[in-house]
Amino acid sequence: MENKFQPIVKEKPDAELLTMVYQFDQWDTEMLRAVEGELQNRQILPEDIKIRKKEIIDKELADLAKGKDASLLGQIFGWLGVLGILGIIIGYNYAFSRTKSKYTGKEFYKYDEPSRENGTYIFYTSLAVFVLYFLYKLVTLRGNPF
């Protein structure tokens, strides 16, 4: 299967391709596949590349699996904005945001468990308050349709 980088890679000298393959974390995955394929065709693909790739991928997966802490300021604005759409947006972001691994494509939650839990509370509380406010305004309109 040919990708769009193969013609570019075929023109590059061996030294440049070897440099690119060792800078694994700085290149697009399609470009790296093309570089590795070309090095394999030229029979100069280093043996330690698979080990280095695995180490980098394992480190990235460990970092993504942990997630990051939600900012305190964002959570404060989320709770203050619980009466409107701002709370819904911030809560949804903290509760459901995902990020993909650059190398494997596997999805992980962007935030750690306590941040997601707090985001879920902000989201559903904001949603409930917004719906109740909307219903209240609908019922108290002049010329009540009911």
Image: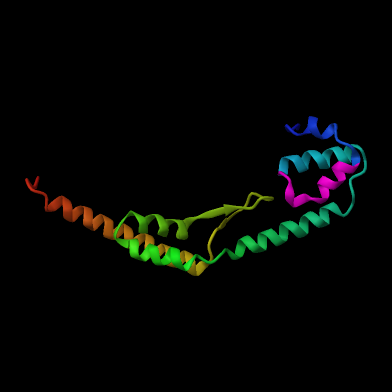
The spot of residue 94 in percent (x, y) is 46, 60
User: Does residue 72 lie above or below 83 as drawn?
Assistant: below
The stretch of residues the image draws in magenta is 15-28
> Magenta stretch mostly in which secondary structure?
helix
Residue drawn at (87%, 41%) of the image = 39
Query: Left of 142 or right of it: where is 132?
Result: right
Residue furthest to the right in view is 43
Of all residues shown, which one is farthest toward the top?
7
Residue 118's image quarter? bottom left
Q: Residue at x 36, y 65 (%)?
A: 79
Magenta span contains residue 21: yes
**Residue at 47 percent of width and 64 percent of height:** 116
Residue 43 lies left or right of residue 82; in this view the side is right
Residue 88, by quadrant, is: bottom left
60 vs 82, nearest the viewer = 82
Queried whether the magenta region covers residue 3, the answer comes back as no
